[in-house]
Image (cartoon, rainbow, N blue to C red):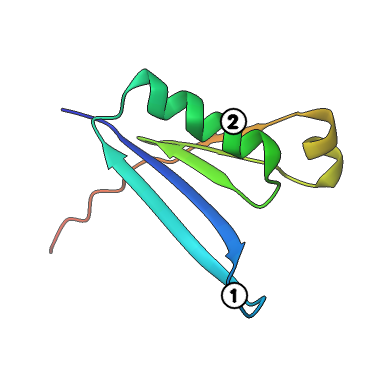
Amino acid sequence: MALTLVLEYTRKDFFNNSIYTKDQKRGFTKNDLIKSFLFFSKNQDSIIRIGNFIMFWKNSNDFKGKSVSVRVVEKKVCQAG
């Protein structure tokens, strides 16, 4: 099963309004991963998700020091009855 690479970030539109953007690619390549991390390293309000892993900047100091936080999200299975 191929993992999905998701890059979430906020960008400014033509009228300087913030727009939440979510780009994703299933079955990503090494080059896709490199480009995503380059963007992530330059944008404090970005998040990278790969499978159950979420990488983000906790605060401005972490961004300046390049200290990334990683969380593992468990998929919950709902059972009826």
Name the amino acid type tagged 1. Phe
Which numbered disc flags the more N-terminal residue, 1 or 2? 1
| Quarter of the picture holding the C terminus | bottom left
Q: CA distance from mark 1 to mark 2?
A: 24 Å
- Image quarter for residue 40? top right
Q: Nearer the viewer, mark 1 or mark 2?
A: 1
Residue 73 is tagged as none
Up/down of 81 relative to 61, above or below: below
Q: Secondary structure at mark 1?
A: loop
Left or right: residue 49 versus residue 47 is left
| Residue bearing mark 2 | 38
**42 above or below 2?**
below
Callout 1: few (<14), some (14-19), or many (20+) C-alpha neighbours within 10 Å? few
Q: Residue furthest top?
A: 30
User: Does residue 10 sit above or below 69 in this rendering?
Assistant: below
Q: Quadrant of residue 32?
A: top left
Direction front: furthest residue: 14
Residue at position x 59%, y 62% in the image: 11
Picture disc at residue 14: 1
Instruction: Give the residue displayed 20% in from the left and 29% down from the top.
Output: 2
The amino acid on which the numbered mark 2 sits, given as a three-letter code, is Leu
Residue 22, how many percent across, how many down?
A: 43, 56
The one nearer the camera, 15 or 59, is 15
Question: Is 13 left or right of 27, judged from the image as shown?
Answer: right
- CB atoms of marks 1 and 2 within 8 Å: no
Q: Residue at the location (55% across, 45% down)?
A: 47
Tell me the quarter of the image containing the N terminus.
top left
Q: Nearer the viewer, residue 2 or 14?
A: 14
Relative horizontal placement of residue 32, taking residue 63 as reference (left or right): left
Disc 2 on helix, strand or loop? Answer: helix
Locate residue 64, reporting x and y percent: 84, 35
